[in-house]
Image (cartoon, rainbow, N blue to C red):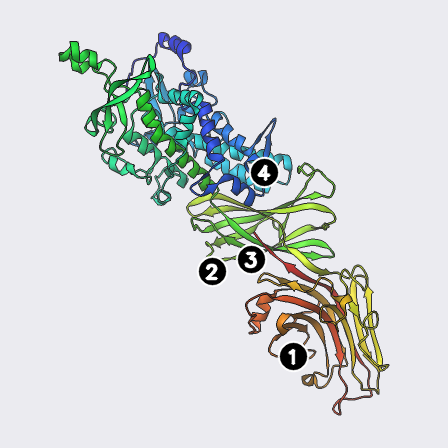
Amino acid sequence: MRNNAPISIVSVIFLIIFWPAHGQPLEKSTHEAINLEIGQRTINEFSLNSFLKNQLGLKEGINENLKLDPVEKTVLGWVGEGGKTEDEPDGFGQLFFNKGRSNNHFHNPLKTWGEAGLNDTVWGLRFTGQSSVLWAQNPNQNAGGKWAWQDARKYYYEGLTCVDKIARDSAFANTFRALGQLMHLVHDASVPAHARNDIHIKYNYEKWLEDIRTYEGETFQGFLKNPISFDKSILDINPNSLASIPISKIIDTDQYNGDNPGITVSNAIGIAEYTNANFSSEGTVFSKEFPYPALTSVEKADYLIPHPRDNSKTVTRQYYKKIGDGEVGYRVATVGFLRDYIMKYFKDYTGLETKALDGGVLEDYASRLLPRAVGYSAGLLEYFFRGQLQVTSLPIFFKNNLSYIKLKIKNLTPTKETMMNGNFILTYRYTPKGKAKDGSQDVFGRAWALNGDLFVPCVELKYYEKEGDAMEVFFRMIPALSISKEEYESIQFMLAFQGTLGKEEGAVIGKYFTPGEVPFGEEWDKGLTGTHAWGHEGVNLFMGNTTNGYSSNIIMGDTLVKDSVRYANVGQSRTNYSWVGVFCCNHEQFKDIFPIPVTRNTSLMFKIDQMWINPIPPFPGEASHWQGLWLHFSNGYALQFTQPGQGVYEGNTTAIYSFNLGYNILGNIYSLFEGAGIKIPEGPFTLESISLIQVLFSLGGKLPWEIEYQQHMEVDFIQIIEPKEQ
């Protein structure tokens, strides 16, 4: 290496006195500014703000406040904080103990990854560190906290699954700070000194860039405006044996080997490779240690620059302009501050000419390196959050309590990677009525798998391309959530996955959603009139029955009990209707909320505990006695739920199903029709009415008159559920 002189007390004293605050990476405030710029923009079609609102349910997006005790910042503030604090601790800790984080911010892509980190000696002091690629995936970071990729994943999972607001906010704050610190490492890979093993204590690109940011803000913003994103194909390149995470290839794809600078022109290359091959640091201008940029890559060219003592004037200065071997069309270095003097007076000593970097060179560097730093760092952020789910939620209420929730989960990850070998976990939070809307008084909890476990396994969930690619799961609330719209302001669920996504083990995906709606629900807990405007035979609905028997509709507990009895030795027909909707004999008082729109996601759920006829008719094929649950739809379509021998054929637009008594019956309405071979026509489709019907037809000569007939039905609940797809 360069300058391998032994350590001396003079060197130590010199460095104590003259060690610049900007001594290692980009200035902290510059890192922070780059991260803030990335966090509030849409880059490569990814917006952190939109993601936070639509996928994580953070209503304020990047402006959501998160407290990492004792400090509270917005999400954007924590991303910026990470950009700044990745350099802490530094200073004397780095100088004397070689333990500063910034020692691990170097990566020379021409070395093996195990040797690619900092290994430089300056004025007798040796500085070493781990390659930034390895540091980014080192879960055993030992200075300034743990902010590796694996740590960010851990914090993210904790934030998604916490059932305590303080712990949740702290975990999310750690997540965004960790991402900011990882983005910092990508920034540094765009700094020539960091890609070329140059500790650069002299005047440097980073200090110049900080001055530009501070004093010429518009120029600095101009460098950031057109980010260059990496080609996502680099994530599929066979990984280095030391790469435990695909994102390592953002910095180094192992494609540039020192002989092929042309390969670095595209964005299908690691940012350290691009930087190393095309730009020089203060201590490596045309250095033999780094093949490119080479003197054969440049030509001398005159540029007009501002006069150093009079900005209203210009002077001509000669530079080395890059014309080949990779990126072209910019100044690589000056020809030397003393070149004109030497050429005039000491023509035989042209070897004394020095190559250097001045403000003009650094401006050309920044115009190419900063857009790549922005685009590649934004790519890291996008990659971290690339996993995306779509959830269709169907809430299941019993006794007005949310007891179960059925989820249809689709993997919509844009990169089309498969989810596998992982688990789903579901948590919820709601704001009780009248409590603080800032979430400080929210109630948190966990849902459970049907087997009582906390997790639902996900063996494989492919990218959703066809119906069979979705996964359906049930979660149970233990205890059931005794909440209604009158008792809470808002409720939301968070579904979290942890497992393998594509090539990344330990990936984490989160998806917030609100449960579907129950536009119609009858629990019979409010008497015969119920929650909805029911008409019941003999109570408030009269269908012309004679005195040949009786019809009874009563509530026992919270169950509707229906009986229809025809006395012995009479044969006239008898009915017992319970009806709500628009078809009930033009009785407007029973119209209630009907018609109800039906979508392809709309489901029916009901529970009927008893449905029998005594005695069982000897000729059920003639449908002399029938009873059941009917749903009538627009255009004459109907669903009939009954028991064997108790149904009646009503034409080819009615689907007839028998069901298990005493069980919760749940089914998608469109699927129920399709299962019976009935196709619903395109266009609006509505539920017109719901009826519970008991019918005893007039007796014919084949049936005995001398016995009494009784129909009995016990109805627990009926619900129409509109799942929500989010």
**Do the numbered discs 3 and 4 sit on residues whose CB atoms are within 8 Å?**
no
Q: Residue furthest bottom?
A: 701
Q: Nearer the viewer, mark 2 or mark 3?
A: 2
The type of residue carrying mark 3 is: Glu
Mark 3 vs 1, N-terminal side: 3
- The span from disc 3 to disc 4 (Cα, nearest Å) is 31 Å
- For the N terminus, give its image quadrant: top left
Give the residue pinned by disc 2. Answer: 466
Q: Nearer the viewer, mark 2 or mark 1?
A: 1
Identify the residue at image location x=61%, y=50%. Answer: 453
Q: Is residue 599 left or right of residue 89?
A: right
Residue at disc 1, secondary structure = loop
Mark 2 vs 3, N-terminal side: 2
Q: Position of residue 615 (x, y in %)?
A: 77, 81
Q: Is residue 581 left or right of residue 31?
A: right
Q: Which mark is residue 296?
A: none
Q: Nearer the viewer, residue 446 or 34?
A: 34
Identify the residue at image location x=16%, y=9%. Answer: 345
Above-or-below relation of 57 to 666: above
The type of residue carrying mark 4 is: Glu
Identify the residue at image location x=49%, y=61%. Answer: 468
Give the residue pinned by disc 1. Answer: 650
- The span from disc 1 to disc 4 (Cα, nearest Å) is 54 Å
The type of residue carrying mark 1 is: Glu
Q: Residues within 10 Å of mark 1 (few under 14, many from 20)?
A: few
Q: Position of residue 127 (x, y in %)?
A: 36, 20
Q: Nearer the viewer, mark 4 or mark 2?
A: 4
Q: Which mark is residue 60?
A: 4
Q: Which mark is residue 472?
A: 3
Above-or-below relation of 560 to 147: below
Mark 3 vs 4, N-terminal side: 4
Q: Position of residue 246 (x, y in %)?
A: 40, 41
